[in-house]
Image: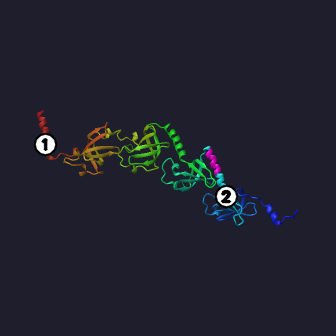
Amino acid sequence: MSELTFEQMLNESFKTIHTGEVVEGTIIDVKPDQIILNIGYKADGIVTRDDYSAVPTPDLTAVAKVGDTLEVKVMQINDGEGQVRLSHKSVALDKGNERIKEAFENKEVLKAPVVQVLGGGLSVSVEGTRVFIPASLVSDSFERDLNKYMGQEIEFVIIEFTPGPRRSRIIGDRKQLLVAKKAELSEALFSKIKVGDVVEGTVKNVTDFGVFIDLGGADGLLHISEMSWGHVENPKKLFKPEQQVKALIKEINGSKIALSMRFENENPWVDAETKFAVGNVVTGKVARMTDFGAFVELEPGIDALLHVSQISKDHIEKPSDVLKNGDEVTAKIVDFNIDTKKISLSMKALIEPEEGEAEEAAAEDTAEATEE
């Protein structure tokens, strides 16, 4: 047997590697764009920045250091410069694919960070493997701006898993989880609420006609007419999205909930018969006007009509000729109807009759007394 040369003995001391094999190496040098590994082979292995991770890594010195061990896949035994081309990303992708396959087959809920916002949806990373969630499956409602999800960890299920040698098609769905959760919350909510309950919720949307309030399982509508005992002109002046509010359940009709903030203990009409009895003199502010009269707010929730014919002894064409919104007026209550909640006022009734009118009235009274 011939003696082995030193080079032959040295080569035999190194292990044999094959393309596609997964090996573990020790980092012996780190540069911003590459990592050099000792993998027990006669040549060192190189992991480039592109082969390190599926997530862009600008500077490898920030994620790796000398002495660390790294699991890598052999991509090319001789890269043309006598070095072994390795990939850490490929190992992570294989593990990620296996994890995703398992979740797909078991219909498991996954949780992973959003690593990229795309034009048509979100890209999340499961152990280095990218999963695409289309915009239509991100939420159970239309999302105009998906950027708010960047960096967030979100839950989803895999609805399509088609691995490929070059490119895999992996689709996630977050919407069905939200729909299922909402259905669960809705069932729980409707099982415990009833008409007359006071509930707390979060303002979801404000419109000209009312406010939609999230009650934690269903939305309730607070109509503009139910926002206050007083007159409300613009809901947007009273409410804003995310505001916490308390409201009374006025009606439940199937899945629809009507709300009210007209709490009975705040009802201004409770003792109105005493405060606004016929003959009482009251002061209020002009709240709004029509051609036939002005509505005067006596207190929040109670308006009274001052008819155009009762504003002055003189003829007035329309109330706006002598009054404007916000004017303070003093008048006598000449009619009160608790059933219809209507009050009529008269400013004219407070005007003292002029001297000639007083004498004429006195003469009429004397004549009537004589006739009797």
Residue type marked 1: Glu
Front residue of this view, candidates 345 and 292: 292
The answer to if 100 sits in the magenta stretch is yes
Q: Quadrant of the C terminus?
A: top left
Direction from residue 77 to residue 128 in the image, left or right: left
Residue segment shown in magenta:
97-105
Which element type, helix, strand or loop, lies under badge 2?
Answer: helix
Instruction: Report the disc number at residue 213.
Output: none
Direction from residue 247 to residue 5 in the image, left or right: right
Residue 269 in the image, given as x and y percentages of width and height? 34, 40
Asked if one can make out residue 4 in the rendered structure from this viewpoint, the answer is: yes
Say which residue appears at 64% left-offset and 46% top-offset.
102
Asked if one can make out residue 322 in the rendered structure from this viewpoint, the answer is: no
Residue type marked 2: His
Q: Residues within 10 Å of mark 1 (few under 14, many from 20)?
A: few
Which element type, helix, strand or loop, lies under badge 1?
Answer: helix
Q: Quadrant of the N terminus?
A: bottom right
For the residues labelled 1 and 2, the Cα–Cα distance comes to 111 Å
Establish if 111 lies above or below 47: above
Q: Residues within 10 Å of mark 2 (few under 14, many from 20)?
A: many
Q: Earlier in the sequence, mark 1 or mark 2?
A: 2
Residue 120 in the image, given as x and y percentages of width and height? 52, 54
Residue 87 in the image, given as x and y percentages of width and height? 67, 59
Say which residue appears at 63% left-offset and 61% top-offset.
50
Front residue of this view, candidates 352 and 248: 248
Say which residue appears at 31% left-offset and 46% top-offset.
297
Residue corresponding to mark 1: 360
Residue corresponding to mark 2: 88
**Which of pointers 1 and 2 indicates the residue nearer the eye?**
2
Magenta span: predominant SS is helix
